[in-house]
Amino acid sequence: MKNPEFLWSNNHNENEAITVKVIIDLEEHCLNGTPHPVHDPGVVIYYLIKVNDQKHETKKSQMLGREIIALDSKDPEEYLIYQTRRKYGETYLEPIGKDELVNFKAEGIESFIVKPKMYHFSIGKKGYESNVRYLTVRQILVDFAHVDPTLNTLSTKGGSEYNNLEETIDLECVNKFVLFNNEPTPVS
């Protein structure tokens, strides 16, 4: 716990209640096993939360996953969030939903990690991943399958062919592809 700060104006009166600002560094509290203070009307608690490598101070005792992602200046629709928790001497990552409420008063929360959302897809039996949701047919053929797009065709498992190399594919909707070689085969 950081040193308390006293908050009042220079014109404060002796009968006025003094408010104490207490900053709880979640990481420090977790690593040292320090319990959180109990509610006290004269104390205003701020939480210092670590998101990736940056610490952020908030007066909120709980936030949605999307709000924590936004603290890291990331788009909640394109990023995932995990909390680093410590329990029984073990540290582990726990995923947090974008609309899940995280209570900073809960014991064991050490920090938060924001990572880009990964999109998984396969071409035949080989798996790939991309942190970009929308790829063109050309990008899939050249950057992932490493084939000549003029000699190969990409198709869905259902048989729909992608003939336009600049067509954009949403990897959240289609993620299984088949590759066809367009080279003519010799006739015997």
Image (spheres, rainbow, N blue to C red):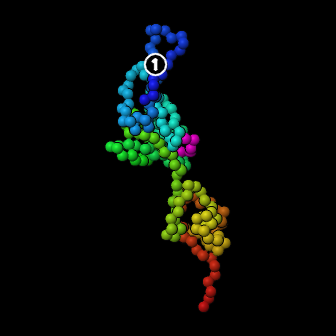
17 is within the stretch colored magenta: no
User: What is the secondary structure assignment of the residue under circle 1?
Assistant: strand
**Highlighted range, magenta:** 72-76
Q: Position of residue 26 (x, y in %)?
A: 43, 35
Residue at position x 45%, y 41% in the image: 111
Q: Position of residue 63 (x, y in %)?
A: 47, 36
Sort mark 1 into few (<14), some (14-19) or many (20+) by Cα contacts within 10 Å. some
Of 80 and 57, which appears nearest the observer? 57
Question: Residue 32, relative to residue 121: is it above or below?
Answer: above
**Quadrant that contains the C terminus:** bottom right
Q: Position of residue 54 (x, y in %)?
A: 53, 39
**Quadrant that contains the N terminus:** top left
Question: Residue 151, relative to residue 94: is it above or below?
Answer: below
Residue at position x 46%, y 32% in the image: 47
Image quarter of residue 41:
top left
Farthest left residue in view: 88
Q: Which residue is mark 1?
A: 19
Of 93 and 127, which appears nearest the observer? 93
Kind of residue indicated by mark 1? Thr
Of 157 and 45, which appears nearest the observer? 45
Side of 87 relative to 13 (left or right): left
Farthest top residue in view: 14
Q: Position of residue 56 (x, y in %)?
A: 52, 35
